[in-house]
Amino acid sequence: AQSVAQPEDQVNVAEGNPLTVKCTYSVSGNPYLFWYVQYPNRGLQFLLKYITGDNLVKGSYGFEAEFNKSQTSFHLKKPSALVSDSALYFCAVRDIGSSNTGKLIFGQGTTLQVKP
Amino acid sequence: DTEVTQTPKHLVMGMTNKKSLKCEQHMGHRAMYWYKQKAKKPPELMFVYSYEKLSINESVPSRFSPECPNSSLLNLHLHALQPEDSALYLCASSQPTSGGKRNIQYFGAGTRLSVL
């Protein structure tokens, strides 16, 4: 069965410092991986995706993610955190058994708190 | 434009009421999704429509009844709900192709439902 894990419930970082939000995955075959962000009382916003190709994926709002096949990880990173980056972050993998429906399997989420 | 519009934003209903949630997108997407999300938890998939036909029902109770009247609209009809059904209901849409490149799901802001 496919799954993603986000080992940290919360990550705290000071504004201006680099941030990392961790995600590991377990899939059979090639993974299709996504990061979404959710601000309070809002829907999920797409940040970036990995399908194939370069292991460093660049996304919205200065975020990037590094795909590491040997470690089965897809960590989200940003060189310099902003207070406005404080939100709930979800890693997700596409369920390859879902044919054309694009069903996503989400991690449990990581709350990012950026302090001034 | 990557907008998915959900109405209403908030809904309070009694356990005997009948209400409907509405979702609309004009991105030409032919897959649409309903999710239920509890606070600080990942979204839980409820239904998937592909080309206006129901393709996935994640064993959702019959008090939730989805409808896809056309390629731009998705409704969720609610009847005889329970207090534990109180949650944020999210709609999403995507291209239903088998290639992962197009399977980015775009989410609406959600309807906050309270069942009294």
Image: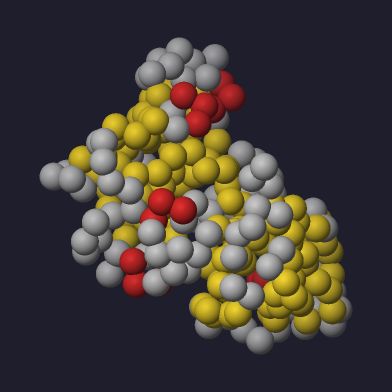
Question: Where's residue B29, x and y in %?
Answer: 60, 59
Q: Is residue A62 above or below residue B33?
A: above
How many numbered discs? 0
Left or right, B83 with respect to A31, comes to: right
In the picture as drawn, the residue positioned furthest to the left comes out as: A70
Q: Position of residue A3 (x, y in %)?
A: 32, 60
Report if residue B84 is visible in the image: yes
Looking at the image, which is closer to me, B66 or B53? B53
Quarter in which the C terminus of chain A is drawn: top right
Residue occupying image coordinates x 43% and y 56%: A106
Left or right: B45 as drawn, with respect to B82 = left
Q: Which residue shows up at 64% across the image and 45% down it? A: B2
A51 over A86 or under it: above or below? below
In terms of depth relative to the viewer, which is nearer, A89 or A56? A56
Q: Position of residue A70 (x, y in %)?
A: 13, 45
Quadrant of the image containing the N terminus of chain A? bottom left
Q: Which one is nearer the viewer's eye here, A36 or A116? A: A36
Q: Is residue A5 left or right of residue A11?
A: left
Which residue is at a point 73% across and 72% down the rendered structure image?
B70
* In this picture, residue A99 sits left or right of residue B48: left
Q: Point out residue A14 in the picture as x, y percentages from the top left corner.
A: 45, 17
- Judged from this view, the residue extending furthest toward the bottom is B62
- When asked about the image quadrant of residue A97, the answer is bottom left
Q: Nearer the viewer, residue A7 or A54?
A: A54
Can the viewer see residue A23 in this picture?
no
Which coloring applies here? Answer: secondary structure
Residue at image point 46% right, 56% down: B103
- Asked which quadrant contains residue B11, the reply is bottom right
